[in-house]
């Protein structure tokens, strides 16, 4: 973590992110946590909160640069991504049949181009019978994030200059959420994977970041006690993961409430 951002570090949010990752791992480990896939929803809200917070702080300091923003993301993401993709290709060379290896190579190129979510949407989806055999399935969420962040800094920058940051983000959130609900009725797989139906989760985190700290307007004694409630918020988010089940994208509003509450605390 860079020195510029170390002062903004939130240990509680980092802990919530760990809970989200563990939940997803347990879901894929033989379905040991039935609603564990909801950890992805938690992660999207956290990502929107943290990254949008960085964007807004740099805008306020007059230091924001789109080029620097994407350079930092490349430096953070690509080293680990390259190792994963190279390792999968190397192991697959020895274990897979030619046709299977060709499909793996296609998935690898899609992952490197941050298009895994589009490829998965065209296939059998996240819960399909073939999903456990797709080694790079997990890269779909990275694709959603990177597609989102291609346009989000420009959008937030425009809102910030016009002094409509929170209201503009709220409008984007509602529009995306409404689209998500409608799309889930027509094509649940598309609603699950496409960036415009996932935007509202990242925007929920961004809205929390743009709203500022809720502690600033509270009496000192109340503000001091609220951070002690963060573990309860995290526990509530965990309970949502355990109870989440395959509720479909239509249940998205309920699923987002837990992580958003934990971040807001």
Image (cartoon, rainbow, N blue to C red):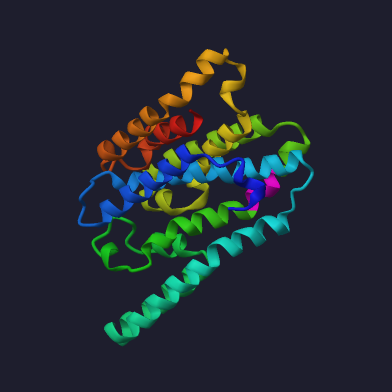
Give the residues in magenta: 151-156
Q: Nearer the viewer, residue 253 or 218?
A: 218
Which quadrant of the figure has residue 258? top left
Q: Is residue 142 a member of the stretch shown in magenta?
A: no
Answer with left or right where residue 216 lies relative to residue 39: right
Predominant SS of the magenta segment: helix
x then y, percent, for residue 52: 61, 43
Task: Please report the residue visible at 26 percent of the width from the left and 52 percent of the height from the top.
Answer: 26
Which quadrant of the figure has residue 100? bottom left
Task: Please report the residue visible at 33 percent of the width from the left and 42 percent of the height from the top.
Answer: 248
Please, is residue 91 above or below residue 234 in the view?
below
x then y, percent, for residue 107: 42, 72
Q: Judge whether residue 125 can be spotted in this image.
A: yes
Q: Nearer the viewer, residue 171 or 7?
A: 7
Q: Judge whether residue 183 can be spotted in this image.
A: no
Q: Nearer the viewer, residue 159 or 11?
A: 11
Task: Please report the residue visible at 29 percent of the width from the left and 39 percent of the height from the top.
Answer: 244
């Amino acid at each position: 973590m860079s020195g510029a951002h170390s002062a903004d570090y939130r240990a509680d949010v980092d802990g919530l992110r760990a809970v989200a990752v563990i939940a997803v791992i347990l879901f894929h480990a033989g379905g040991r946590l039935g609603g564990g896939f909801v950890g992805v929803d938690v992660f999207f809200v956290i990502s929107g909160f943290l990254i949008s917070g960085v964007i807004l702080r740099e805008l306020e300091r007059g230091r924001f640069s789109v080029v620097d923003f994407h350079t930092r993301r490349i430096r953070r993401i690509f080293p680990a991504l390259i190792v994963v993709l190279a390792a999968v290709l190397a192991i697959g060379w020895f274990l897979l049949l030619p046709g299977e290896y060709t499909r793996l190579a296609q998935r690898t190129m899609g992952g490197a181009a941050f298009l895994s979510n589009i490829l998965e949407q065209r296939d059998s989806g996240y819960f399909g019978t073939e999903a456990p055999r797709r080694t790079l399935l997990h890269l779909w969420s990275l694709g959603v994030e990177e597609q989102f962040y291609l346009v989000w800094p420009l959008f937030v920058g425009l809102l910030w200059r016009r002094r409509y940051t929170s209201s503009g983000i709220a409008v984007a959130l509602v529009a995306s959420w409404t689209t998500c609900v409608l799309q889930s009725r027509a094509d649940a797989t598309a609603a699950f994977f496409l960036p415009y139906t996932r935007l509202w989760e990242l925007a929920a985190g961004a809205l929390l970041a743009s709203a500022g700290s809720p502690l600033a307007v509270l009496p000192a004694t109340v503000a001091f006690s609220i951070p002690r409630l963060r573990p309860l918020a995290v526990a509530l988010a965990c309970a949502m993961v355990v109870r989440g089940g395959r509720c479909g994208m239509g249940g998205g509003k309920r699923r987002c409430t837990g992580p958003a509450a934990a971040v807001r605390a």
